Amino acid sequence: MTFAVLTGDLVRSTDLAQKRLDLAMQSLADSAEAASDWHGSSLMFSRNRGDGWQVCLARPSLALRTALYMRAALRTGGKDLSTRISIAIGVGDPGPTGDLNSASGPVFVESGRALDAIQTPMMMSFAGGGALAAAVRLADHVSQGWTKAQARAIYPMLAPVSVARREVAEALGISRQAVDQALEAAAYPALSDALDLIEADA
């Protein structure tokens, strides 16, 4: 089957106390579980090599949205929490156990190799090249600058369902104006338009 595979690792994980490392991994796992509703199946979040992780997406068109969603989830814990992410789309076998450490196939290999090839200042890449790779590069640049407050505002808005800004404000215990300001600073309007265009074209 054709999947999108996101492979990532935490940035400067050796500088993180064990409590922060565990918080980071739990944030990624929780966001992957939440995103399973979009994909209609589990993302099979799997941790590997201590600070590494991987998910498998049943809807490849949502790959960039999911990557940004997971990055936002992580950044809500603080700006010291960040991850590199590589995206690949192709065929593979996630295996019968739900543990992607035993997955096989070209897409898993390609995603892992793409992660190894990422060089600073890049933190996110798409292995397939083309227009989507360009969009990922720009989204990477924008999202690297998200503050904790911006990430908290944009995280629920990245879900591919209609979410009212008023609801976000109430959930966060802040004003609607503060949500609007955070979303503008996080470039949410442009990112949302770009994601809609990518997904409509898929």
Image (spheres, rainbow, N blue to C red):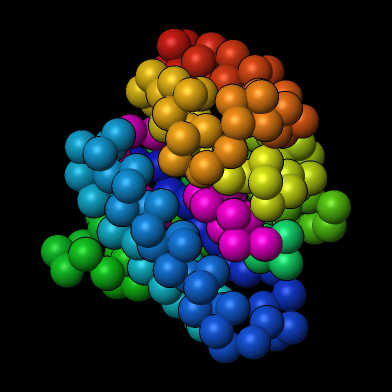
Which one is in front, 10 or 75? 75
Stretch of the chain drawn in magenta: 55-78
Of residues 117 and 23, the one nearer the viewer is 23
Query: Horizontal and vertical percent for residue 183?
Result: 66, 28
The image quadrant of residue 119 is bottom right
Residue drawn where x is 73% and y is 75% of the image: 12
Q: Is residue 113 left or right of residue 62?
A: right
- Specify the quadrant of the image occupied by residue 192: top right
- Picture residue at 60% right of the left edge, 62% below the top: 77
Q: What residue do we see at 41% from left, 52% from top?
A: 31
The answer, for residue 137, to whether it is visible in the render is no
| Front one among 90 and 52 | 52
Q: Is residue 67 magenta?
A: yes
Q: Is residue 134 left or right of residue 128?
A: right
Classified by dominant secondary structure, the portion drawn in magenta counts as helix
Residue reaching furthest to the bottom: 18
Q: Quadrant of the C terminus?
A: top left
Residue 168: give x, y in percent of width and height.
48, 33
Left or right position of 32 against 40:
right
Residue 117 higher or lower than 136, as above or below = below
